[in-house]
Image: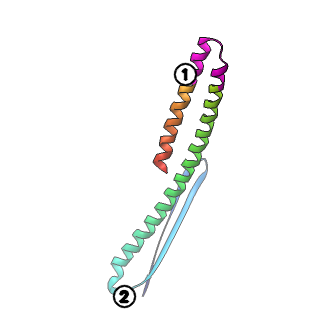
Amino acid sequence: MKISRSFSRKVNLGNYETCDSFCALEQEIDETELEATSAKLANLCEQEVNKSIQKFKNAKQVNELTGKIASWEIDLETNQKKLKLAKTEEQKKYYQKKISDCEFQLSFLNSQLAQIS
């Protein structure tokens, strides 16, 4: 006797983007194993689908964070250059504050990236 179980899930990721995942498993059994094997296969299918969706979500988050990090790194570099060219103390303080803000944002975004990876 063969038993098959499947599981599918569709997740809305926002901005009209979805993630669809499907898993199907089949196993040869004798009739005494029906209930236990059915539950086991159903559970395995659901776990695999959820893992797949989580991997997709993580990859999407990594891409978004990487883009934000690149943007803040450019801002940091730009403000460091402007600080070197600053002539007044007021300008220097302004760019030092901007640099501090960039460094804070980069630290925060990198910690988020580390949690995902």
Q: In this image, 29 relative to 81: left or right?
A: left
SS category of the residue bearing label 1: helix
Viewer-proximal residue among 5 and 61? 61
Q: Give coordinates of residue 11: x percent, y percent.
A: 52, 56
Residue hosting label 1: 97
Look at the picture and state if 104 lies above or below 84.
below
Q: Residue at x 57, y 24 (%)?
A: 98
Q: Nearer the viewer, mark 1 or mark 2?
A: 1
Q: Residue at x 32, y 85 (%)?
A: 32
Look at the picture and state if 3 lies above or below 92.
below
The span shown in magenta is 81-98
Look at the picture and state if 63 lies above or below 104.
below
Question: Which disc number belongs to residue 7?
Answer: none
Is the residue marked by circle 2 packed among few (<14), some (14-19), or many (20+) residues within 10 Å?
few
Are the residues at dot 1 and dot 2 in contact (C-beta closer than 8 Å)? no
Is the residue marked by circle 1 packed among few (<14), some (14-19), or many (20+) residues within 10 Å?
few
Q: Residue at x 58, y 44 (%)?
A: 66
Look at the picture and state if 9 lies above or below 113.
below
Viewer-proximal residue among 113 and 7? 113
Q: Give coordinates of residue 110: x percent, y percent.
A: 51, 41
Amino acid residing under circle 1: Lys
Residue hosting label 2: 30
Labels 1 and 2: the sequence-earlier one: 2
Amino acid residing under circle 2: Asp
| Magenta-drawn stretch contains 96 | yes
Q: Residue at x 49, y 37 (%)?
A: 108
Q: In this image, 58 relative to 40: left or right?
A: right
Q: In this image, 11 relative to 46: left or right?
A: right
| Magenta-drawn stretch contains 16 | no
Mark 1 → mark 2, Cα distance in angstroms: 71 Å
Q: Main secondary structure of the magenta part?
A: helix
Q: Give coordinates of residue 20: x percent, y percent.
A: 56, 61
